[in-house]
Structure formats: C-alpha cells, structure tokens
Amino acid sequence: MSELLHVLVGQLARLGLNYSFLLESHASGKLLDGALTTLWLCLWSIVGSLLVGVLLAAAVTSARRWLQWPARAFIEVTRNTPTLVQLYCAFLVLNMLINQSLGNANPMTPFAWVVLVISLHKGAFHAEALRAGIEAVPAVTLEAASSLAFSRRQQLFQVQLPLAVRFALPALVNNLIDLVKMTAVASAIAVNDITYASIMIWTQGDNVIELMILILAFYGLLSFAVNCAGRAVEARLRMPGYGN
Amino acid sequence: MPSEPLIQLRDVHLAFADNPVLRGIDLDVHKGQAVSIIGPSGSGKSTILRCLTGLLRPQLGSIRIGQTQVDQLRGEAELIALRKQVGFVFQQYNLFPHLSVLENLLIAPTKVLGRNRNEAREQALALLDKVRLGHKAAAFPGELSGGQQQRVAIARALAMRPELILFDEVTSALDPEMVGEVLAVIRELTEEGMTCVLVTHEMRFAEEISDQVYFTEHGRIVEHGSAAQIFGDPVHERTRTFLQHALGQGGQRPSRPAPDVYRNLGRYSLSV
Ligand SMILES: Nc1ncnc2c1ncn2[C@@H]1O[C@H](COP(=O)(O)OP(=O)(O)OP(=O)(O)O)[C@@H](O)[C@H]1O
Ligand SMILES: [Mg+2]
C-alpha cells in the first residue's frame, strides 16, 4: 500500500505536482480524518434531510391548515436564504444562546450543527420534490384503490407514496448530489472536514494546487457514488412501460 | 321477476354546487341481471355508478344494495364493507402502474380481505386465464395494450369476489379491435350470472346482453324496459332519436349488418 503511494507520488512529481505531504503521517492523517468526517457529514445529512423532507411534504400536502401553513413558511424561508448564512446564524447565535443557558451541558457540537442545518435546508428542497410527486399521482388511480376497499391509510402507503417517490426520485437524487457538495460549508465553523483539513495543510506549505485537485476529485467521486446509488434505486423502482 | 331487487334506487338527487346532475333516479337491478344505462354524454350515467359504490353521496333519495343503505353510510369502515361487495371497472383502467399484473390482482384480496397469499395467487392466476392473459402475469400495466389492461382491471375487480360489478364505459378508450376482446369477457360474466350494471355506448352489445336497459337524459330516467322493448320499440321520441344517432342512419342498421345482427333481428323483430 505505502509502496504504491510512493510510486504514485514519484510519478506525480514528474508532472510537477508535489504530493510528498501524503507521505508524512501528520498531513496524511489529517486529510484522512477530514475525508472520514466529510463522509459522516454526508451520511447523517442524507438521512436527516430525507426525514425532514418527508415530514415537511406530509405537512404541506395535509388538509390541516395549521400544519400546512407553518411548513410552507418554513420551506420558503429556508429555500430563499444561503446555507452558509443559516449555518452562521445557527452556530453563532443559537449555539451561543444554548451555551449561555446550559453551559457545558450543551449537547450540540459544531458537527451536529452542520448536520442539522443541512438537513433542514435540503429537507425543504426534498419536500418540494415530494410534493410534486404526490400531486402527480392521478386522482383516478386513488379512486381505483378506494373502490377496491382500500382504507385511506392503505391508499397512502400502497399507492400514493410508492408512486410519489418514483415521480420525485430524479429530483431527490439531484438534491442529494447537491448536498454532498454543500457539506463543505462545515469548514466555515472549523469542523474538520476534508475542506478544512486541506486549508490547514496548505496554509503551512506550498501545495494549494495539489490539495485542490485532491479535494475536487474527492467530492467528485462522492457525488458520483451518490449518483450511481440513485440510478440503482431508480432502476429498481422502474415502472416498465409507464407513460408510453 | 324474483322478489327483492339487489340494487334499489329511489328518487335519487345529486347536485354539484348548483348544477343538478341527478334529478330523481329510480332504478332496480335484480340478482344475476345485466342492466345497461345508456344516454347522451353528461346525462349523469357515471354519477349513478359512483353513487352506487359510495364515491359520491346523493343529497336526496335512497340507495340500497343488498342489506346496505348506501346513502346512510357513515365513516370509512362502512364504506369499505360496501366496496368489498361492489366491483368497479373504469373507463381508463386505472391499474396500479408500479405493480405487476399479478400484484395488481393480489393487492386488494391480501391487504384488504386478508386472504392467504398462496390461495389469492392461485385464484389470481385462474382469473388471468379466464380473461385470456395468463401469459402476462409478470408484465407491468404499461407494457400492455389498452384492451389487455382493461381485461386485467376486470380480473382485478373479480379477484375481490364481489356481489356485483359496475362497468363505466369500459370500452370507450379502446381501439375498435380491442373492444371485442373486452366485451367478450363481460358477456361471459353475464352468462355466468354475475350481476352487472353497465354504462356503455356500445348499443349493439347492450342490446345483446342486457336484461334491462335504462335511458337517461338530464339526470332523469326517460324510459326503461327490456332490451327488446327499448331498442325495438322505444316509447319516447327522445329515446328514438338518441338510438337513431347511436345506431347509425335513420334508426336503421348499417346496410350490411354482421350475421349476428340478422339473428338479433329475428329475436327482437326490429323493423329494418
Ligand atoms: N366532480 C364533479 N364536479 C362537478 N361537476 C361534475 C363532477 N362530475 C361530474 N360533473 C358534472 O355532472 C354531469 C354528469 O356527469 P357524468 O360524468 O355523470 O355524465 P355521463 O353521463 O357519465 O357522461 P359521459 O357519457 O360523457 O361519461 C356533467 O355535466 C358533469 O359536468
Ligand atoms: Mg361517464
């Protein structure tokens, strides 16, 4: 493994790229840590945002005014303000307030704030995608279900949601790819993700270009993986011949 | 006629906002009968069927199916109990596009009636054979022709073993070649004694299979009677002109009718 790395670093040096920092345990350890942190950020926020999205979509499409209205307002505010600003607000304002009242008992770490803000932000986008999916389910298909004696609940879980998810899937995958890239905002509040780790390394050395290439490739690969996973789910849920 | 009708509508009124759609409908269907409702577009035919299965509630009048007073039903559980007895087949098939043909037939019997999956599966495959689609069990609705989808929809309704089936213009969305294959399935059902209420524009078919025919216009029953009477000797001028348009020029059969029409001529002694 380290043999291979040596060879690789040697080859890259011929191209004029100095990746020798990968051979130092300090820098490479930091980078690896950052990569792992980014992976965890992605995983948690994907799960979190999907949860938030489903709940918001349920609220927005609900017949109950008192659920519909606040959810709608939340989605609009969230969609129309920058994630970075939201993160600063959450971390600098909310976190400080919590600190003031709870002191050291504050359970929110910077990592948790990033997951929370991204989950809420992307959840708003998921909710819109899901709402479009729910509204695209033909009323007559639901009528067919109810004439087959399905209960409201069975209609929802057997027909409406399965179809809504299929309709919303391409937009959801799109949102998730965006989410992967969005995790870089974590560096703004000193969470040691891969972007922050790179910044720490290049401020101490002269390897900005090398690190840039490295982290761009890393985010690219992550997005690609999410894309592939999305495609796989789409293929699994495909409705052969639908819409022809 | 045997005593109590299975379906009985009395003076049923229904309006959408201030648009009166049903204005006093009386209708009887006895067990085992095939009853057709014919009439111009917008006359309220679909609305009658939707009232029968509780999708719409009349503002006035009484609807009874078997022991159930449909217009009095309260709450989801009671509607579900009714719909277990009443099958409905739609003009647009309305199959579940995310489920295979077999799953379309299995979902209601297993999830709603709680039937054993293996038994339900056997029955579903038998029903698919019956509508001559046994070889399509694994296909998805989107992969079938309109006529095939409609036959699946009929099999899906039958899988609930309903007391009666309502057909709402089930051939209207089909190419002429596919109409025959769907009508053949319905014909078979009526011959087996399934109670059927059909809204249809296929006059020839209605004439052939119906025990009773109701002609509706503007939310009223203009007249009803045996198929022979309605098609052969309608009382009302309006029925006469409607049938003239529906059947072709001047109330006469097309110049060269198919052989089965000659048979029908004898049966109903139509003047040509
Ligand atoms: N959900 C609804 N809301 C408002 N008006 C409706 C609704 N459904 C039907 N109508 C009106 O009720 C009238 C009767 O409709 P219905 O569908 O019963 O007619 P139909 O006899 O089945 O016609 P067709 O042969 O075209 O299917 C029409 O004028 C229609 O515009
Ligand atoms: Mg209709």
Image (tube, rainbow, N blue to C red):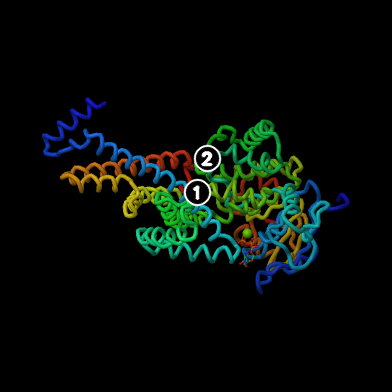
In-front residue for pair B86/A25: A25
Q: Residues within 10 Å of mark 2 (few under 14, many from 20)?
A: many
| Callout 1 secondary element | helix
Task: State ligand 1's quadrant.
Answer: bottom right
Output the chain of dot 1: A
Task: Please name the residue that numbered disc 1 is placed on.
Answer: A165
Q: Is mark 2 within 8 Å of ligand 2?
A: no
| Residue B201 percent coordinates (x, y) | 63, 56
| Residue lying furthest front | A103
Asked if one can make out residue B268 in the rendered structure from this viewpoint, the answer is: no
Frontmost of labels 1 and 2 is: 1
For the C terminus of chain B, give its image quadrant: bottom right
Q: Residue furthest right?
A: B3
In the image shown, does A82 or A144 lie closer to the viewer?
A82
- List x then y, in percent, for residue B174: 55, 49
Q: Residue at x 40, y 41 (%)?
A: A231
Q: Chain of mark 2?
A: B
Residue at image mark 2: B140
Looking at the picture, does residue A3 appear above or below residue B259? above
- Quarter of the view holding residue B229: bottom right
| Residue sitting farthest toward the bottom | B18
- Asked if labels 1 and 2 share a chain, the reply is no
User: Does A5 sit above or below residue A91?
Assistant: above
Q: Name the residue type under label 1.
A: Val
Where does residue A52 sit, x and y in percent of width and height?
49, 53
Q: Amino acid at mark 2?
A: Phe
SS class, disc 2: loop
In the image, residue A200 lies at what x, y percent? Answer: 25, 47
Q: Is residue B21 visible?
A: yes
Question: With respect to residue A122, does A73 lie above or below?
Answer: below
Q: How many labels sit on residues?
A: 2
